[in-house]
Amino acid sequence: MLGMACATVSGILYRIGLGKLSRLEAPEPPNRYERRHAGELLHIDVKKLGRIGPKGAGHRVTGRRIQTPRKADAGGVRRLQVGWEYVHVCVDDHTRLAHAQVLADEKASTAIVFLRSAVAFYASHGITVHTVMTDNGSAYISVLHAIACRALGVRHIRIRPRRRRTNGKAERFIRTMLREWAYGAIYASSHERATALSGWLERYNTRRPHGSLGHKPPISRLTGTNLLGCQWPSVSPQLRPSVLPMGGRLFSPLVAISSPHPWG
């Protein structure tokens, strides 16, 4: 019909983003939902972050590549010695109140530790957790995790494979967390970055305006008031890292905790 080879037609369609048959179908309309009460549903996910090596921050922040030492494992594969950290996160569907921890791995035992921590965190705010939603990672489909959910009296549901947007509130929170916490400052070490997480979470939950909540912080859905003017506790000088340049200004994530407007 076109007088062109099939490979040529396929190549042209691929270049303009129509390489798959599903691209010709109308996009599926967004399915936005929100539970009526706090604790009805928690969105849980894990984000893997590269550790900060002895030479400091990597190319994502500094723009320059640092030669990272490698070491052969038992199978003879040369692997990075710096390794990874895993940020476990959860977000309440109704209030958007968030909790996160930097942990060593994403095994079932570690996921259970975080689940217990999350249940305790929301209980401290008067919220009883009824259901948690996760993806189909190995930790979440394990028998150990199922037993832990049953022991805590929590129902566990999993999203359909390749439907990450079902857990979209956790995914969106991770994007915000990476932009404002993980890559929002230059950290000298992984320990300094992990220490700054609690301060950023405090701001996210009690001060930072949230677009889907009428530009009020998540805590306002529990108290019925806007807490943007509340004062934070000051941070011990021993915990304050050195001030580092970021975006043409002096920035220190932990020192900023005691200021009225941390993280800008």
Image: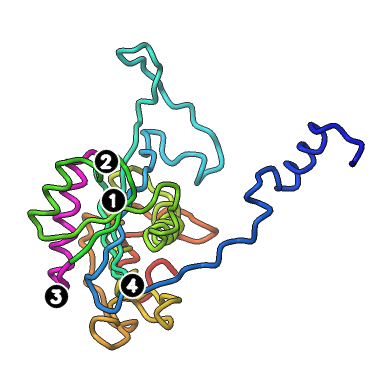
Give the Cα separation between the discs numbered 4 and 1: 27 Å
Is residue 127 covered in magenta?
A: yes
Instruction: Tell me the amino acid under the disc marked 3.
Output: Gly
| Dot placed on the residue nearer the N-terminal end, 1 or 2 | 1
Would you name the residue on which mark 4 appears?
A: 259
Instruction: Tell me the amino acid under the disc marked 1.
Output: His
Q: Residue at x 41, y 39 (%)?
A: 56
| Dot placed on the residue nearer the N-terminal end, 1 or 3 | 1
Tag 1 near tag 2, CB within 8 Å:
yes
Which residue is the extreme one toward the left? 151
Is residue 204 covered in magenta?
A: no
Q: Secondary structure at mark 2?
A: loop
Q: Secondary structure at mark 3?
A: loop
Secondary structure predominantly adopted by residues drawn in magenta:
helix
Q: Which quadrant would residue 89 be assigned to in this image?
A: bottom left
Q: Secondary structure at mark 4?
A: loop
The region drawn magenta spans 105-129
Tag 4 near tag 2, CB within 8 Å:
no
Would you name the residue on which mark 3 appears?
A: 126
Would you name the residue on which mark 1 appears?
A: 88
| Dot placed on the residue nearer the N-terminal end, 3 or 4 | 3
Instruction: Tell me the amino acid under the disc marked 2.
Output: Glu
Instruction: Tell me the amino acid under the disc marked 4.
Output: Ser
Q: Position of residue 53 (x, y in %)?
A: 37, 34
Which of the numbered marks, if any, corresponds to residue 106?
2
Color theme of the render: rainbow
